[in-house]
Image: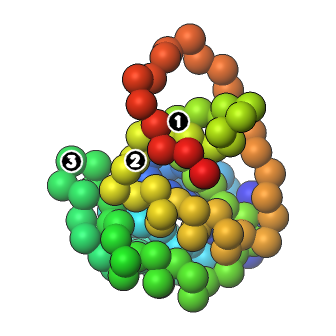
Amino acid sequence: IEDGDSLIVTSGVTPHLTVLYANERTNLKIVTDSFHVAVDLCRRKDYQTIVLGGELHKEHYFVHGRDAVRQAGRYMADKAILTMDGVDPEAGLTTLRVEGAQDFVSLWQTSRKSEMRAFATSEILPSRICW
């Protein structure tokens, strides 16, 4: 993350912490579906924070649905910081976020730079949404 970057940041611990650790960066423009991310970042006067609208996921505090997908398509960002539950050699990216899966795809597509960083875990998840 560089000074002046525009970012798409989804809900999830990894995207949230990534942006918080980049707090030495200035003049960021952030589009997010996460209320947690928005609350933390809107405290910075040099950051512009935009929250997508849509239906609120009551457990994880992110927005999803048709309105969120439409709004996500209106923005273009330098980088996207997204959460996912896995990378499968056959299925591709996977997520358990059934409610937000289409939002995730829309947000990924609005990023100018696609770069994937992943870490391995031994946890096996029982189901997934793939694209």
Whole-number angstrom distance, CA of label 1 to CA of label 2: 9 Å
Task: Please say whether residue 118 is visible from this viewpoint.
Answer: no
Q: Which residue is most to the front?
A: 90
Task: Tell me, yes or no, whether the two marked residues, 3 and 2, touch with CB atoms within 8 Å.
Answer: no
Picture quadrant of residue 26? bottom right
Q: Between tags 3 and 2, which lies in front?
A: 2
Residue drawn at x 68%, y 81% as measured from the top left: 76
Q: For mark 3, what is the residue? A: 59
Mark 3: amino acid: Glu
Picture quadrant of residue 58? bottom left
Mark 2 falls on what kind of element? loop
Mark 3 falls on what kind of element? loop
Is 9 drawn above or below residue 73 in the view shown?
Answer: above
Q: For mark 2, what is the residue? A: 97
Task: Please say whether residue 92 is visible from this viewpoint.
Answer: yes
Q: Which of the numbered marks, if any, corresponds to residue 85?
A: 1
Residue drawn at x 52%, y 78% as measured from the top left: 72
Residue 53: x %, y % from top left: 34, 79
Task: Tell me, yes or no, whether the two marked residues, 1 and 2, touch with CB atoms within 8 Å.
Answer: yes
Residue 113: x %, y % from top left: 81, 64
Which badge, 3 or 2, comes first in the chain's sequence? 3
Whole-number angstrom distance, CA of label 3 to CA of label 1: 17 Å
Packing grade of label 2 (10 A; few <14, some 14-19, many >=20) is some
Whole-number angstrom distance, CA of label 3 to CA of label 2: 12 Å
Residue 61: x %, y % from top left: 27, 56
Mark 1: amino acid: Asp
